[in-house]
Image (cartoon, rainbow, N blue to C red):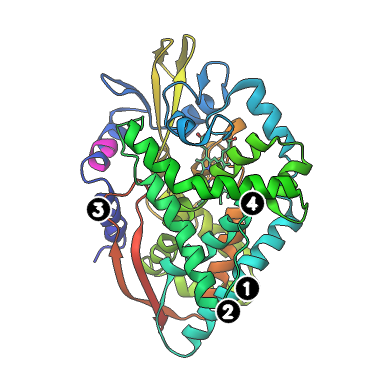
Amino acid sequence: MRAGAHELRLQLAAHPLAYPVVRLLGRLGPVVRVPGLGIVVNEASAAREVLTDTGTFRSGGGTEADLWTPVFGSSMLVNMDGPEHRAMRRKLAEFFTPAYVRRLIDAACTEPLARTAETLRRGRPVDVVRTTKIVAGAVTSALVGFTVTGSTAEREAAYLRMTGQATAIIGLVKLGRLSLSAPQITKARAIVAEIGVTTSLAWEKGDENTAVGRMRGFGLTEAEARGLASAFLIAGTETITSLLPRMVAVLHDHGELAGVAAAHRRGDTRPVEAAIDESARLITPAPIILRNAVRPGRIGRVEVRAGDRVVLSALNCARAPGRFDLARAHPPELRRLWFGAGPHFCLGYPLATAEIHAILGTLFDSAPLRITARRAERGVLFPAYRRLEVSRA
Ligand code: HEM
């Protein structure tokens, strides 16, 4: 099977109609006005221009970010703009320091990844999707203020439940429908009610060794801490559970897994960084970023009117340079566009990167690996594997 065929299957399983349409729109030009949809941006420098011009293009006011406001309130960063957004980001500038990220990752990853390594060492298969969900669930539990105790099996179940809550909420969203109905809002609130209470309790305690205590220490109000915790749940679980297993599969399918693993084992970081960047480019887990124009302007040669919706096809932008190629240098305008750009650039980027390094590092240590089973998830917002089983070759 062609190396890219598995990725295509994942995309089509997630978005059987939207994926071909979006890719087709990508052929119409760098920036195109599509009646009924908005202005579609398919080129990285134009996308970067939009994301950094916050005077003209806003996150709030009918974009996907606003969708969450009735459920989580207005302090989620993604649904904020202007001075309020700037002020909250400024307070959080030192939130994910390298030392804090290391602490979070050590606490979340050490045990599940030791078990993953042991399973592989014994010649048994590991489901990379499940491992990633456990790690992401452990990280998110820490970030929203959940203290998880009990046996290994009980803790794993709690972490999987946390990831499952994010999946259930994000599952309410469909491409092309940018608001939640009243019953959906009720359902979403019910799913996250417990998390909000937990975050509030942690905020009251204010223990600066905990994530929510840190938020309070950095000057966030209780409402802001609850908003941020929910942003972490929404933004930080499905993205990584989409990306990480697909990275493993992409490297495997292009015949690069063994070489990159060997580089990792001899401590050569450059090929590993290149593998992470190039596979993330190809995958671009959040394929679309939306903005609204609040005043007239221009994107490339296309005139923008106040009220226009701008659909940034991060996927088309990222795919434009061509096929997967580990030797490819990413031009400046493309640089990690899959994590956004400008003032809304992914706050969790250092954490996501550390999660990727921790999980890939464990798998690379157990190489050579081969994929022994895989299955695509259907009808999801972020294309993903439902199962990706690897074993020692
Ligand atoms: C593979 C993993 C990830 C990807 C691809 C990703 C991608 C993105 C993108 C594209 C944005 C910008 C959205 C926009 O401009 O509208 C964003 C924002 C954000 N991300 Fe991530 N993200 C990832 C992981 C994480 C993690 C692990 C966390 C935290 C636990 C996180 C927290 C956030 C937050 C809070 C924002 C909002 C920032 C703001 O609006 O100021 N993300 N992410």
Residue carrying label 2: 114
Q: Are marks 1 and 4 in contact (CB under 8 Å)?
A: no
In which image quadrant can residue 90 be found?
top right
Between discs 3 and 1, the one toward the N terminus = 3
Q: How busy is the neighbourhood of tag 3: few (under 14 within 10 Å), some, or many (20 plus)?
A: many
Q: Are marks 2 and 4 in contact (CB under 8 Å)?
A: no
Between discs 3 and 4, the one toward the N terminus = 3
Q: Nearer the viewer, mark 2 or mark 4?
A: 2
Residue drawn at x 47%, y 9% is 296
Q: How busy is the neighbourhood of tag 1: few (under 14 within 10 Å), some, or many (20 plus)?
A: some
Quadrant of the picture in which ligand 1 is shown: top right
Q: Name the secondary structure under disc 2.
A: helix
Q: Which mark is residue 170?
A: none
Q: Are marks 1 and 2 in contact (CB under 8 Å)?
A: yes
Q: Name the secondary structure under disc 4.
A: helix
Residue carrying label 1: 110
* Residue closest to the far left: 17
Q: Name the secondary structure under disc 3.
A: helix
Residue drawn at x 52%, y 60% is 137
* Image side of residue 134 versus residue 219, left or right: left
